[in-house]
């Protein structure tokens, strides 16, 4: 019997696709997805189908109704092959919210205001109960950049951050001049970029070569933090935005 973990839950629809959190991990990350399916009914059907081997803790439909499918104490199968700060069992370290939207292949409509309000309120409830850091609220594309593009560049990360959900700084506007790195480049500028992305948490190679894996990470960064231009090229506006993000992270307290 699944009982709601949040007072914001409107209904329960149990998914059998669960197991125990591993290595004693507790939720430190909140992963936001879009469903990529045409209707919320179909999304819930898939997330509860044992043949599909996927699940999530919560689904938020276009009207803002919240359905819980997995208890927060359980490990939902929502992240897949993924990493953040070197942790590769994101399912054990996170809670996942699926947001109903047909996605890029289904026309990628805007996220309705009622839906975003519900995502905000549910996210606040979760992060406050687990004392999650702001930078622990992530896109599916952040943790699995080679496989996922959700919730995408239309998602209102800025609005969520203003309400206390997630980490955000005003992005630098793209320009045509200055630094520009792209696929195939090899130099210390590429290495420095990779090291800074890794310092923020991304699972990026640090080879000094702008390979396809690096490009996927750059695209994921742009979708989340510099959505005005998602082109897979690293320019001065991306670099400036990343430095602002790193600078805005909480600093460790000095022990005196």
Image (spheres, rainbow, N blue to C red):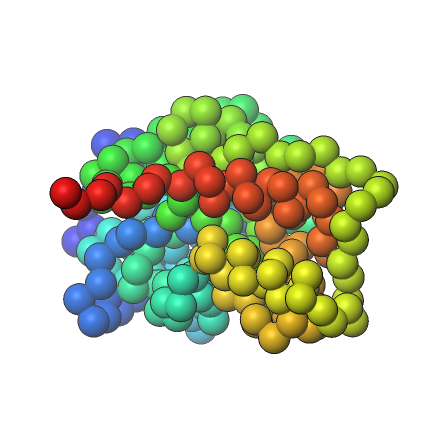
Report x, y in % for residue 248: 44, 37
Examine the image and state in which quarter residue 210 appears: bottom right
* Residue 105 % position (x, y): 71, 53
Query: Is residue 64 rendered to the left or right of residue 147?
Result: left
Is 193 rendered above or below residue 67?
Answer: below
* Vertical arrangement, residue 104 with respect to residue 120, above or below: below
Q: Nearer the viewer, residue 135 or 31?
A: 135
- Judge whether 214 appears above or below 141 on screen: below
Task: State the residue at coordinates (74%, 71%).
Answer: 186
Q: Is residue 43 visible?
A: no
Q: Is residue 121 visible?
A: yes
Q: How many marks?
A: 0
Task: Indicate the quadrant containing the C terminus: top left, top right, bottom left or bottom right.
Answer: top left
- Left or right of 175 on screen, residue 90: left
* Residue that appears at 22% across and 43% down: 254
Of 184 and 154, nearer the camera is: 184
Residue 112, quarter of picture: top right
**In screen coordinates, is 231 left or right of 114?**
right
Q: Position of residue 97 (x, y in %)?
A: 41, 47
Q: Whole-percent x and y of residue 49? A: 42, 65
Q: Nearer the viewer, residue 4 or 213?
A: 213
Can you name the residue that lies furthest to the left here?
256
Give the left or right position of residue 173, taking residue 85 as reference: right
Q: Residue at x 34, y 51 (%)?
A: 29
What residue is rendered at 20% in x and 71% in y? 23
Residue placed furthest toward the right: 176
């Amino acid at each position: 019997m699944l009982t709601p973990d949040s007072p914001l839950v409107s209904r329960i629809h149990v998914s059998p696709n669960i197991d125990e959190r591993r290595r004693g991990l507790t939720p430190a990350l909140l992963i936001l997805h879009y469903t990529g399916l045409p209707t919320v009914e179909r999304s819930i059907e898939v997330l509860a189908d044992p043949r599909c081997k996927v699940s999530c803790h919560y689904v938020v439909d276009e009207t803002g109704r919240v359905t819980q499918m997995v208890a927060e104490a359980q490990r939902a199968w929502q992240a897949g092959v993924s990493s953040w700060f070197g942790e590769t069992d994101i399912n054990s370290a996170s809670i996942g919210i699926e947001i109903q939207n047909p996605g890029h292949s289904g026309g990628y409509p805007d996220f309705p205001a009622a839906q975003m309000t519900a995502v905000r309120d549910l996210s606040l409830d979760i992060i406050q109960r687990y004392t999650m850091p702001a930078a622990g609220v992530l896109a599916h594309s952040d943790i699995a950049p080679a496989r996922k593009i959700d919730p995408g560049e239309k998602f209102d990360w800025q609005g969520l951050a203003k309400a206390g959900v997630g980490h955000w700084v005003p992005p630098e506007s793209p320009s045509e001049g200055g630094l520009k790195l792209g696929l195939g480049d090899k130099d210390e500028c590429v290495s420095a970029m990779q090291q800074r992305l890794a310092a923020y948490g991304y699972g990026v190679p640090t080879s000094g070569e702008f390979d396809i894996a690096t490009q996927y990470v750059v695209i994921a960064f742009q979708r989340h933090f510099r959505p005005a231009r998602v082109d897979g090229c690293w320019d001065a506006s991306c670099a400036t935005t990343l430095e602002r993000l790193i600078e805005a992270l909480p600093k460790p307290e000095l022990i005196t």
